[in-house]
Amino acid sequence: MISPCARKRSGNSAWPHRGWLLQEDEGLDMLRTLAQMLRRRWRSWVGFELLYQVVYLSLIGPLLKLSVDAAMALTGYSYLTWENIGAFVLSPATIVVAVAFAAVAALMALFELAGLHYSFTLDASSGRPKVLDAARFALRRVGRAVRPANIAAIPYLLVLLPFLGLGTVGGMVRSLSVPEFVMEYIQMNPLYALAYFVLVAILFVGVAQYVFLVVFLVADDVTFAQAARMARLAGKGHVAFDVARLMLVSFAFTIGIRLLCMVAAAPALLQSDGFELWWGNGQVLASLAVILAGTPISYAACLAVLQSRGSAVSPATLPEPLVPPAAEPFVLCAACVVAIAGSAYFTWAHAVVPAESMGSILSRDVELTAHRGGTFGAPENTMAAFEQAKRDGADVCELDVQQSSDGMIFVSHDSNFKRISGVDKGAWELTWAEVCELDATGSYWQGSAEPQRYPLLDEVIAWAAKNDMRLNIELKPTGHEVRFEESVADIVRAHDFADRCIVTSQVYDTVARIKEYAPEITCTYVTTLAYGDLCQLDAADVFSLEETSATPAMVAYLHEHGKQVLAWVVNSKSSMRRVMGNGVDTVITDDVSLARGVIDEANDMSAVGRSLNALVAMLT
């Protein structure tokens, strides 16, 4: 579908500098075409996108929950954690439900893009594009796309295309991100960081060749494979320039819209809580604008690139009307009302948000736990780190314990000494005397900190008792230990420290054994994933959730059952605001000072400012 003139222009020039000039000319043409599309058709694409977002945001949450609940009912699971998620995901029933949900989500994404295609490409002689006509055209395209030959469109639309970060596909996939603790683990290991970079580069280069695939998929009655060939032909020799232009448009839009929204919110500066209102209103407006306009602008940019090069993209045709033109506004209003009402009922019925307001949540006290001690100022899990945590103002120190070959309980996150001490031995392979000979400073702190050793749990508890510090003691069993849980409980009892600590583990059987042996100790189950009726895990008095699992619904559910909630490991301001707004009792962080600043900032704000801050955290 590439015109002859486009093939001629994309050919190799005998003069390299002329190729660059052509690319520059195409870039200017692309910007002019993009501006014309957005300006001349703004009523149509804004109206369609508003309708789509209202319906999409009202349906996708309930649909996802119903899908997960259906899979759990079919497989007999009442809750999901990191320990059972593997078996659940690999069960045939879950796979069938997941594929069905992914197919529906992909069709919804395709529906959005097809509606935008209609809004941007309808011939001027057909009149101004109407919202319901765009929806009808999109439904027709989606119907034609439902065929076995297009199964590959599901991962393309939901995973690969969003991976480019161009905003071409929005909705649910736009908000997906790698958890902070995973990225930090990757960044700390040079080999993993290199592998991650290589994988990202390979994916980026591979997907970039098909950035225009979605345009041909919605523009023409073709299969996924045919659209892929058309996309490769359209971008041949121009991939780097095309992706650079699209990324530049996405970046310029994001920055520009935020600046405009901050300017639009400027009148708030005249009020008593002016700065809070200005910042909060501006961020909320910008987040909403990105949600509304991000995908349309990115799709229009794809069309503009192709048109500036002379690539023939099939325009939309006027579909047969579903309702009389006079009834269109009423149908639009009815669709929005039904979608919003359904979403509101689902939210109320399933306790998607806590009963307490976001403003009141942010104003209450939240405890701060120093993850492995004050690791920003001292080597992790050492006495120096715990002293640093005290200076930082932590309420609790989190630490990890291992067992030596002669049964001594000492503090170390890793069961192997390779990362910290450079010795490739497991904790169970060395006696305590041999462990004492190892350097616990770690390569990061070599030469910049006093040499450290691995402390005994007994030593840390004695220090905590003298310094009015509470402890979060995590057990990391390897299967080599002997009476591991009992040994830890005995040490806690020997110091009469049960009311000043919690004992935690990511292995529920370990939590249950501690609770059975020492019921007076507060036991905590640590999990990366949390969904469903977690309170069936009745040995856990407290739940420590990876921060993305500490949702408002889960926190509210656990609080209703008398369980406290910890969130880990939370190191960015936005994540801290979000989990605090979700109602957690404790934030586990590597940066206690930053978290303390977030709490102080929230407590100094007015109720309106706190609510706006929480809303910004939720939207971003």
Image: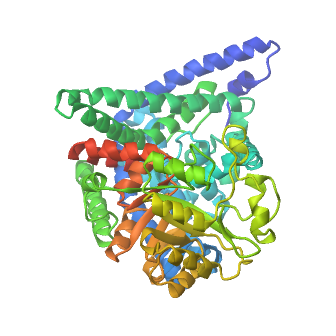
Percent of width and height locating residue 588: 48, 56
Query: Which quadrant holds the N terminus?
Result: top right
Q: Nearer the viewer, residue 455 or 48?
A: 455
Q: Position of residue 318 (x, y in %)?
A: 43, 44
Q: Is residue 592 above or below residue 264?
A: below
Residue 409 against residue 168 in the figure, above or below: below
Kindly identify the residue that appears in the image at 75 percent across and 45 percent down: 190
Q: Is residue 19 visible?
A: yes
Horizontal side of 448 relative to 350 (left or right) equals right
Which residue sits at x=31%, y=26%?
263
Q: Residue at x 22, y 31 (%)?
A: 274
Residue 174 appears in view:
no
Q: Nearer the viewer, residue 428 or 293?
A: 428
Whether residue 571 sits left or right of residue 428 in the image: it is: left
Horizontal relation, residue 502 to residue 410: left or right: left
Q: Nearer the viewer, residue 449 or 254?
A: 449
Looking at the picture, how far across and down is residue 245, in whole percent?
60, 28
Where is residue 384 drawn, in percent x and y? 59, 49
Q: Who is closer to the viewer here, 205 or 239? A: 205
The color scheme shown is: rainbow
- The residue at the point 70 percent across, 46 percent down is 451
Q: Is residue 349 left or right of residue 8?
A: left
**Residue 550 appears in which quarter of the rendering?**
bottom left
Q: Quadrant of residue 261?
A: top left
**Residue 65 found in image quarter:** bottom left
